Image (tube, rainbow, N blue to C red):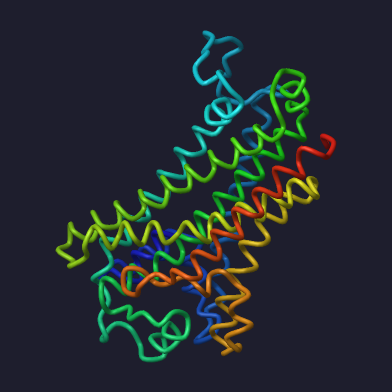
Amino acid sequence: FLARVVADTAGGAGWLRWLTPFGWAEEARAFADPRPQVLLLPLALTLGLMWIGGALSVRRDIGRGLLPARDSARPRTRLLSSPTALALRSEAGGLAAWMLGIGFFAVIVGVLSDSFSPENISAELQERLRRFGGASLVTPEGALGLYFVFFVLVISLFAASQIAAARAEEASGRLETAFALPVGRRAWLAGRLLLAALAAAVLAMGAGLLAWAGAASQGADVGIGGMLSAGANCLPATLLFLGLGALGFALVPRAATGLAYGLVCAAFVWELVGALIGAPRWALGLSPFHDIGMVPAQPAELGSAGAMLAIGLAASALAVAAFARRDIVTG
């Protein structure tokens, strides 16, 4: 995805489209001057990977990979003082991966924020972007404001992944062992939600800071305060989805993962489609993404942000109360 972003925005980098499947989809030109022969590339790559996988599979023992695994290791007792600390220990690798991916993307969009001009953005595209949020893409603030809508999506998906992690811990049976010890159900879920919220805040503020660094490296006139505000602007919707996902986990645990991811994706897709087809404002308002100001190009929607935070906190509180009253559901 990043390779396609660079190919579409940086002068002379169009060749990068041929290095990514996202670029192949663009080069196929399905809606203008179709080139179906480009579809042979993903077909050939798929067949090649299948052949390589088959060749490698006959060279290893059953249940073993080509890279040896360690059967023993020195004990590590850090972050075992509480269930929340254990959750941080378990999720540390995943959090680092999210931070690396989001941080890298943030630097790239910061570097590219002053690459747009009226000459390389068609009037039709500018009109579609105006319908989507109203910010002008031809200024660094406008470009970053639009990009940060996608950071809201990504960080909300991170929140959904935390609901999925909590459900996986329950489904595996590990919670039964934990609750046999002096560990309260309310404290366990509240700790998981607090950890997820703090991690989301780190990701959001890190994205704002790194996007500012990327923009500053190109001399773009973007203030660090505005970019930190853009990062903070990601949190109301994220915490709303976190609370709703937690409520789903407490009420319908087996469907919790699908609900958490599905709510985020459905809301984002509806905002995109609804904005492009000119849906009425009340219908667009069903998506939290519609009420996110494109900071730093536009002021934050403080009223909507407060409402989303209130709903997210209320849903989280209801989830903690409901989880304390239901049975553990494994499998």
Height in image: 164 above or below 181?
Answer: below
Q: Is residue 60 visible?
A: yes
What percent of the width, then of the height, locates residue 223? Answer: 21, 62
View extreme (left): residue: 219
* In this picture, residue 253 sits left or right of residue 279: right
Height in image: 166 above or below 209?
Answer: above
What percent of the width, then of the height, locates residue 315? Answer: 66, 54
Q: Is residue 330 visible?
A: no
* In this picture, residue 305 sits left or right of residue 286: left
What percent of the width, then of the height, locates residue 220? Answer: 18, 66
* In this picture, residue 50 sits left or right of residue 16: right
**Quarter-of-image position of residue 174:** top right
- Between 71 and 23, the one lying in front of the other is 71
The C terminus, quarter of image: top right
How many tags in the picture? 0
- Between 70 and 126, the one lying in front of the other is 126
- Between 301 and 123, the one lying in front of the other is 301
What percent of the width, then of the height, locates residue 12? Answer: 26, 69
Height in image: 39 above or below 52?
Answer: below
The residue depicted at 57 percent of the width and 19 percent of the height is 68
The N terminus, quarter of image: bottom left
The residue depicted at 64 percent of the width and 26 percent of the height is 59
The residue depicted at 29 percent of the width and 82 percent of the height is 120
**Quarter-of-image position of residue 96:** top left
